Amino acid sequence: MANRLSHCFYERDVVAVARSLLGQVLVRVDQGRRLAGRIVETEAYLGIPDKAAHTFNGRRTARNESMWTRGGHAYVYFVYGMHYCLNVVAGRDGDPVAVLLRALEPLEGLVTMHANRGPIRGHLDLCRGPARLTQALNIDRTMDGVDLTASKTLFVERRRRRATDVASIRAGPRVGVAYAEDWKDKPLRFFFEDNPHVSTPRGPSSSHTCKLS
DNA sequence: CCCGTGATTTAT
DNA sequence: TAAATCACGGGG
């Protein structure tokens, strides 16, 4: 509770939230067990002008309703008939922007995470990918709209980030948004360079990635 | 490379 | 009401 991120963290520019979530720790408490991982990859979705966002052009439906709430809530959606993805809503009430959590470095509850995931190829695949991390942490549509600043079962803890971590942040195009025309190549995906828990493409060798400022 | 899978969205 | 879409992952 003490170290939990609060509204003043989430109610900011969505790109700033996406970048500063890197290195923070996502915590899920399930069946009395703590499942936790360090956030190593995020994507920002900029809302109404963003052709890749579920709220592009002001779309407001039962599915994306939680994106319209105040920053600090969860937005969980179901896609491809079998996968759930977790977003952290950012910005002010009525500004439908969010950050997709794409990968975690597992920290706590690894045995339970493995049980939740079932057989996997290698340990690196435990939380590497947006639908893999929700499966590992047992997050589904029932967690949609949860208040991360108050929930006992889903929240983000603040960690002190080392200067070397901040310096290793890279940006690149978002994954799986080829349909988004002029928005598909914008560098709105953020990750730690050379971290093996980041989903591909990663590292400086990937085209279109760049250092920040 | 291809394909499962079904809720959600969009077109008729 | 019907068709297309999809912020993915697993298998070859």
Image (cartoon, coloured by chain):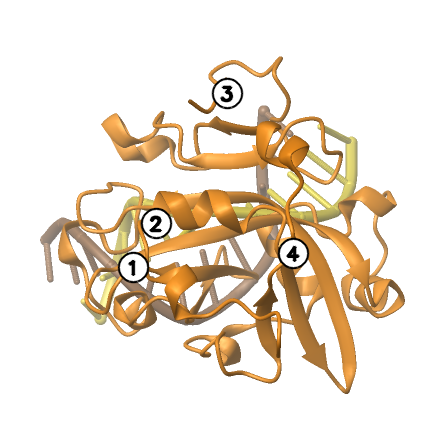
Chain colours: A orange, B brown, C yellow
State the residue position of label 2. A14
Q: Are circles 1 and 2 on residues that touch, CB within 8 Å?
A: yes
Residue A180 in the image: state x and y as whole percent.
29, 34
**Image position of A200 with respect to A1: above or below:** above
**Residue at the spot 14% in from the left edge and 50% down from the top edge:** A57
Which label's residue is closer to the chain start, 4 or 3? 4
Left-right relation of B9 to A18: left
Residue under circle 4?
Answer: A159
Foreground: disc 4 or disc 3: 4
Asked where in the image residue A193 lies, by quadrant, the reply is top right
SS of the residue under disc 4: loop
Residue A115 x, y percent position in the rendering: 85, 68
The kind of residue tagged 1 is: Gly
> At label 4, which amino acid type do we have?
Arg
Disc nearer the start of the sequence (1/3): 1
Q: Earlier in the sequence, mark 4 or mark 2?
A: 2
Local SS, label 2: helix
Cα gap from disc 4 to disc 2, whole angstroms: 19 Å
Q: Is residue A175 visible?
A: no
Q: Quadrant of residue A37?
A: bottom right
Q: Which mark is residue A91?
A: 1
Considering only order in the chain, which callout, 2 or 1, is on the residue closer to the N terminus? 2
Q: Say which amino acid is labelled 2.
A: Val
User: Disc 2 sits on a residue from what chain?
Assistant: A
Q: Which mark is residue A211?
A: 3
- What's the amino acid at mark 3? Lys
Quadrant into which the N terminus of chain A falls = bottom right
Which comes before the other along the chain, label 2 or label 3? 2
